[in-house]
Amino acid sequence: MKKLIFIGTLILLFASCGDEEQPKPKAYLALDYPEAKYKPFNNDCPYSFEVNELAVAKKPAGAKDCWLNLNYELLDGTIFLTYQPVRNNLDSLLRDAQKLPLQHTIKADAIEGDVYTNPYNKTYGMFYEVSGNAASQAQFYLTDSVRHFLTGSVYFNAQPNFDSIIPAAAYLKDDIRHLMETVKWTERE
């Protein structure tokens, strides 16, 4: 009888050995976007810059002159650009531009600001990187402190879910940085 119990136990042990079911680890989507290729973008506004070839520039309906949307169909996102001339109102323009990223603090995990200066192009400003489930993942402003003031924000056409938009947000953040580096003021107004 002991021999039968021992053999039965061995059969059960060997029968139970096999591939154990394990939950799959969480993963991110492997989204690959084409390498950014930039081209000059000139318009009838007092600024120009280089734009990614993936972006389609459109003036929003009913918007002020020199406001512009850079639509990225592949990423389902947009960089919104607003331009305002400086007319003894630099303080209020700066205050408004610095308040805008703070509106996302409720949903954001962190907001980091980097000072941007380019004396050669006379562009000075801030780049704000927003992480977490905030509506906008990046914002910036640029000015020459005398005549020109340009702001920009990234928004996606989806409910914010930071984990799923990380690759697209990173791609557009790089485009904003390139845009900031290539802005040149013109004398048109």
Image (cartoon, rainbow, N blue to C red):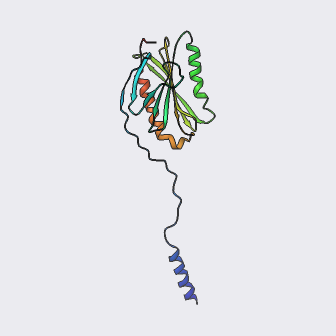
Q: Position of residue 1 (x, y in %)?
A: 58, 90
Exactly how many numbered labels are in the figure? 0
Residue at the right extreme, as displayed: 106
Q: Position of residue 18 (x, y in %)?
A: 49, 71
Residue at the bottom extreme, as displayed: 1
Asked whether residue 87 appears in the rendered view, the answer is yes
Residue pictured at 63% horizontal, 34% vertical: 106
Is 145 situated left or right of 32 in this image? right
Q: Is residue 44 above or below residue 166?
A: above
Asked whether residue 128 appears in the rendered view, the answer is no
Is 52 situated left or right of 60 in this image? left
Nearer the observer, 112 or 36: 36
Q: Position of residue 42 (x, y in %)?
A: 39, 21
Q: Position of residue 56 (x, y in %)?
A: 43, 30
Nearer the observer, 94 or 81: 81
Residue pictured at 52% horizontal, 52% vertical: 26
* Quarter-of-image position of residue 130: top right
Nearer the observer, 73 or 99: 73
Nearer the observer, 134 or 158: 158
Residue at the front extreme, as displayed: 61
Residue pictured at 57% horizontal, 12% vertical: 89
